[in-house]
Amino acid sequence: GLPGVEGFTSDTGTVLEKSWLWALAGHNVEEDELMNLLQAHGIDDLEPQAFADLHDEVYHRQLSSLAAQCGELVRKIHIVKVWLHASILNVDHILVMKAKWQKGRYDQSDQDRPISMRMRGNQDLEDAVVE
């Protein structure tokens, strides 16, 4: 694939095959804008996957925004926490996390915490709770 810069398919040994295509880098206006913003604030050592995740978070899923404040770059996110309360046999209970499956790993770091998630920037509280 690389020497001829042609598309190729990788065989994973399962039923699924992955097709790959080479694309020109640096011609996405959003990516250029994000890279310029990061570099203007001295951030130029992001791993490629971290940059892709940040780009997706800011521009596509709109879960956060970046803004310069007092010469520093600040990442803003909106979070909604839900406390689900129930009285079961006259004993108060609150629904909490046991664990979560994230990025291919079983994570218990949020154990016994209330349910929380990020809100999209343009989302109101009622929609976030329903989601």
Image (cartoon, grey):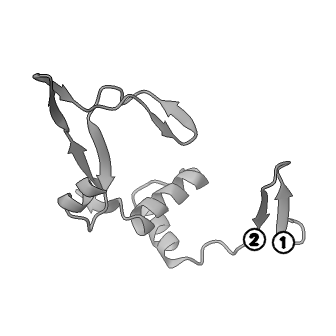
The local secondary structure at tag 1 comes to: loop
What distance separates the C-alpha of mark 1 from that of mark 2? 6 Å
- Tell me how many marks there are: 2
Name which quarter of the figure residue 5 lies in: bottom right
Tag 1 near tag 2, CB within 8 Å:
yes
Q: Nearer the viewer, residue 72 or 30?
A: 30
Q: Is residue 87 left or right of residue 106?
A: left
- Point 34% across, 32% down: residue: 97
Q: Amino acid at mark 2?
A: Trp
Please tell me in which quadrant of the rendered image residue 95 appears: top left
* Residue at (76, 70) in percent of width and height: 21
Against 79, residue 98 (above or below) is above
Q: Is residue 2 left or right of residue 128?
A: right
Q: Which residue is mark 1?
A: 5
Regarding residue 101, the answer to whether it shows in the image is: yes
What kind of element bears circle 2?
A: loop
Question: Does residue 81 lie above or below 22 as drawn?
Answer: above
**Residue visible at 32% across and 52% down?**
118
18 and 45: which one is in front? Answer: 18
Residue at the left extreme, as displayed:
90
Question: Residue 71: in sight, yes or no?
Answer: no
Which residue is nearer to you in this view: 76 or 18?
18
Q: Quadrant of residue 89?
A: top left
Residue type at mark 1: give it.
Val
Question: Which residue position holds label 2?
Answer: 22
Residue at (28%, 55%) from the top-left corner? 76
**Where does the image place residue 125, in percent across and percent down from the top left?**
19, 58
